[in-house]
Image (spheres, grey):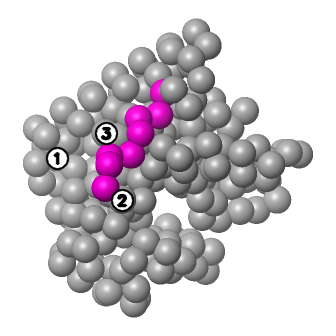
Amino acid sequence: MLERAIIDHASPTLARLKLGNLFNYPVREGFDAEFADLQAMLAGKGVELSVLRKTPEKALVYVYRADELATALRNDGVRRLLQSCGYARFDVDGALAMLKSRLNDADAFPHEIGVFLGYPLEDVLGFIENGGRNCLACGCWKVYSNECAALKAFRRYEKCKSVYQRLFASGCPLSRLTVAARPA
């Protein structure tokens, strides 16, 4: 059930605590229809669903806040990083198209994906520069800069996930658990 996977893997995005989350989901009969239904329902709350890569067995599902991604993509440091990875467009659709291309064409996972998940730029750059080694802490991501803030965020995300799982299990629908978009 895709709804349950979104609760388990993307509650901080639903709660507007995090820009985005990413998870693999098995592709079964009815996946496309279920995905489209949830995509339509969540879009009304400011949450987008996208399949970044799909094989016959699994889909890499990206759950994100487009307004927050657009803000991140306007950051000069983020643009420099993405430009160094071959990105030419910095609007949401253009950047996602390039990310999908890099995910589908490369053998290795593109490390700039941390930007699309809302990780601090310093940590994304630290991960790239250190090849994933020498981090200060490890949780939702590897931390290279503000360890205290990252550890607080990790605890907040875990608490959110726990609360959302409990509420969902008690019958609260995904639509009610999703915080609406900020007014423009």
Alpha-carbon span between mark 1 and mark 2: 30 Å
Residue under label 3: 17
- Is 25 displayed left or right of 97 in the figure? right
Category of crowding for the residue at label 2, using alpha-carbon neighbours closer than 10 angstroms: few (below 14), some (14–19), many (at least 20): some
Does the magenta-highlighted stretch encompass residue 183? yes
Q: Is residue 46 shown above or below 84?
A: above
Residue under label 2: 67
* x, y percent for residue 29: 89, 45
Identify the residue at image location x=28%, y=34%: 154
Does the magenta-highlighted stretch encompass residue 97? no
Residue bounds of the magenta highlight: 177-184
Q: Is mark 3 on a helix, strand or loop?
A: loop
Q: In which quarter of the image is the C terminus?
A: bottom left
Q: Nearer the viewer, mark 3 or mark 2?
A: 2
Q: Is mark 2 on a helix, strand or loop?
A: helix
Q: Is residue 101 visible?
A: yes
Amino acid type at circle 2 is: Asp
Identify the residue at image location x=32%, y=49%: 183
Amino acid type at circle 3 is: Leu
- Is 60 displayed left or right of 158 in the figure? right
* x, y percent for residue 44: 53, 47
Q: How many labels does the image show?
A: 3
Residue under label 1: 136
Q: Which of marks 3 and 1 is in front?
A: 3
Alpha-carbon span between mark 3 and mark 1: 22 Å
Amino acid type at circle 1 is: Leu
Q: Is residue 25 visible?
A: no
Mark 3 and mark 2 lie on one chain; the one further toward the N terminus is 3
Identify the residue at image location x=34%, y=22%: 159
Q: Is residue 148 shown above or below 177?
A: below
- Is 175 displayed left or right of 75 in the figure? right
